[in-house]
Image (cartoon, grey):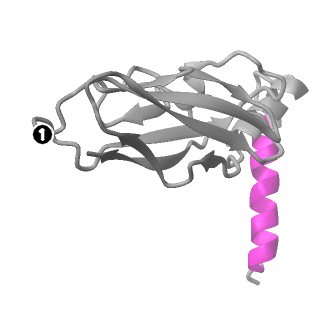
Amino acid sequence: MRASPQRLCSNTSSNVLNDHTSNTNKASPTTATTTAMAQLPPEDIATEPTQKVVFNAPFDKMATAWVVVTNPGTKRIGYAFNTKRIGSAFKTTKPKRLNVIPPNGTLGAKKSVKVAITCDAFNPDGEDTEGDRVTVKWTNTPDPAATVFKPEWFQGDGIVRRKNLAIEYNV
């Protein structure tokens, strides 16, 4: 007799849980819970602006654009804003021209953070600006009470989400 898909799923989930808890190096309930939280898919984030960041001419001095990142979800997330550094979670296509401040942090449920994206002075006629963008990555924190960012959250086997924001230069 063949098991129904629902029954098979139920058994599979149960077996995974039993395999995890019957391990000879048993994790504490807190460790098991925090590890399980990191395995859940992170909920969506919201950004304002939603699609693109705009820098207006002239480009002879540094300019700053602000992005508000909101975690409308129910779990704390870890986020990072970097320019192609190890452990980065906010990448730019032009790391020498674009910078993001603050570099990283945690964001509680229903909380927001205001982030500065700076653009160094450059000659728009002499540089290719086509396809410039910033990409934000985020993941659930393994510890729901975590307040200090840890780059390893993005290097493990947890689920990481991404969102691209195009950069537009008005000449």
What residue appears at the point 63 percent right and 38 percent down from the top-left corner? 68
Residue 167, position in %: x, y? 37, 45
Please give left or right for residue 96 compared with residue 74 in the image: left
Q: In front here: 21 or 33? A: 33
Residue 46, position in %: x, y? 65, 49
Q: Quadrant of residue 109?
A: top right
Residue 126, position in %: x, y? 10, 35
Q: Secondary structure at mark 1?
A: loop
Give the dominant element type of the magenta stretch: helix, strand or loop: helix
- 126 to 51, vertically: above or below: above
User: Residue type at mark 1?
Assistant: Asp
Q: Which residue is mark 1?
A: 125
Q: Where does the N terminus fall, quadrant-wise?
A: bottom right
What residue appears at the point 80 percent right and 62 percent down from the top-left corner? 11
Q: Quadrant of residue 34?
A: top right
Q: Which residues are magenta?
A: 4-20
Q: In front here: 9 or 60? A: 60
Residue 146: in sight, yes or no?
yes
